[in-house]
Image: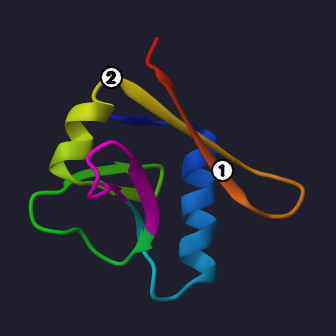
Amino acid sequence: MLALTENVTEIVNKLAEEVPEMSGVRIATEPDGQSLSVSPADHAAAGDEVIEQDGATVWVDANAAEVLDGMVLDGGVDEDGNIQFALGQQA
């Protein structure tokens, strides 16, 4: 299962506070099957894996869940206010 860092939970919680129509983020496989997208969401889609940690909710589609098993999602905000995510292996 995908793990979340404290940075990611803080980002998701802050976004959910600031954007009323959003209650979490969703990670999905793109149509090309090779890349993933992260987008604001207000609910899970059918078959999504639900990750809840420290008040943050992340939904992961079934295909992405397979790819992300054993990974950790980290994130940060750059000096321009853009959110960036990174993946790494769980220790």
Q: Given the current orientation, which residue lies at the most extreme right position?
A: 79
Percent position (x, y) of residue 45? 18, 69
Which residue does the image show at 32% across and 22% down from the upper left?
Answer: 70
The answer to whether 46 appears left or right of 54 in the picture is left
Residue 46, by quadrant, is bottom left
Percent position (x, y) of residue 71? 39, 26
The mark found on residue 84 in the picture is: 1
The answer to whether 15 appears left or right of 56 in the picture is right
Q: Given the current orientation, which residue lies at the most extreme left position?
A: 47
Which residue does the image show at 62% across and 57% down from the upper left?
Answer: 11
The mark found on residue 65 in the picture is: none
The one nearer the camera, 90 or 32, is 32
Q: Amino acid at mark 2?
A: Gly
Q: Secondary structure at mark 1?
A: strand
Magenta region: 27-39
Q: Given the current orientation, which residue lies at the most extreme bottom position?
A: 20
Please tell me whether residue 78 is drawn above or below residue 17 in the rendered image.
above
Q: Label 2 belongs to which residue? A: 70
Q: Amino acid at mark 1?
A: Gln
Bin the neighbour count of mark 1 within 10 Å (Cα to Cα): few under 14, some 14-19, many 20 and up.
few
Please tell me whether residue 41 is drawn above or below residue 50 in the rendered image.
below
